Amino acid sequence: PESAGSLPGQTYLGSGIRAKGPISVYSVQMYVGNRAKNALAKFKGKSLKGDKAFLDAFNGGNFQKTVQIKMLRTVAPSKMISAFNDAVSARVSKSTYSKVSESLDALLTKSFTEGTSTKGTEITFSMSGGTAFSISVNKVSQGSIWSADVCKAFTDLYVGKNAVSPGARDSIISGVESMLSS
């Protein structure tokens, strides 16, 4: 994976590659805001990999979480949109998904276009205050939706038990352990 970038007021946790079979689709890096350390302090000194209480606290925490992905290849926008829609729908209740699906699909459709689903594009998913989910493409905001469930689902996508990149998940969780012990 690439070396860590930096975001003002946030701590880099870890990174990895999202692959589909033998094909590397994008790199992923995760950051958390300064309030994360206090919010997760009770897990200091513990081994967090596979710890359900930690995952629940991390995914549901209302501290800033930022996931940056960088496209490593060009992918059809429809594939990216359906992959993220499917990932969210698998992580929230049917009734929740029916409430957010239209606005989520619109935001994903605005974000993933022929021009942005290309190699080298940087897409940033921000989860703020546990309820605001926003997407930026090459640092240009595409919009936001308000849903704690979408924020949790996008966090779980990268750190949960069934994360899309186990390598990234393990790197991110190790980063949390390091942050808590520093």
Image: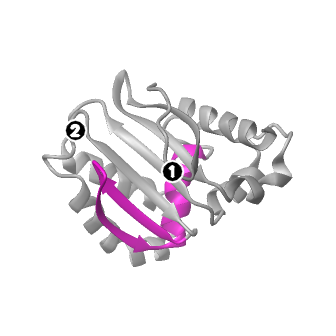
- Find out whether the residues at labels 2 and 1 contact each other: C-beta distance under 8 Å: no
Tally of numbered discs:
2
Q: Amino acid at mark 1?
A: Pro
Residue under label 1: 8
Image location (x, y in percent) of residue 14 = 57, 35
Picture residue at 73% right of the left edge, 52% below the top: 37
The image quarter containing residue 12 is top right
Question: Magenta residues?
Answer: 131-159
Judge whether residue 91 can be spotted in this image: no
Picture residue at 51% right of the left edge, 50% below the top: 8
Judge whether residue 90 can be spotted in this image: yes
Image location (x, y in percent) of residue 120 = 25, 34
Q: Earlier in the sequence, mark 2 or mark 1?
A: 1
- From the viewer's perspective, is residue 101 above or below residue 40? below
* Residue farthest toward the top in the current orientation of the protein: 22
Residue under label 2: 75
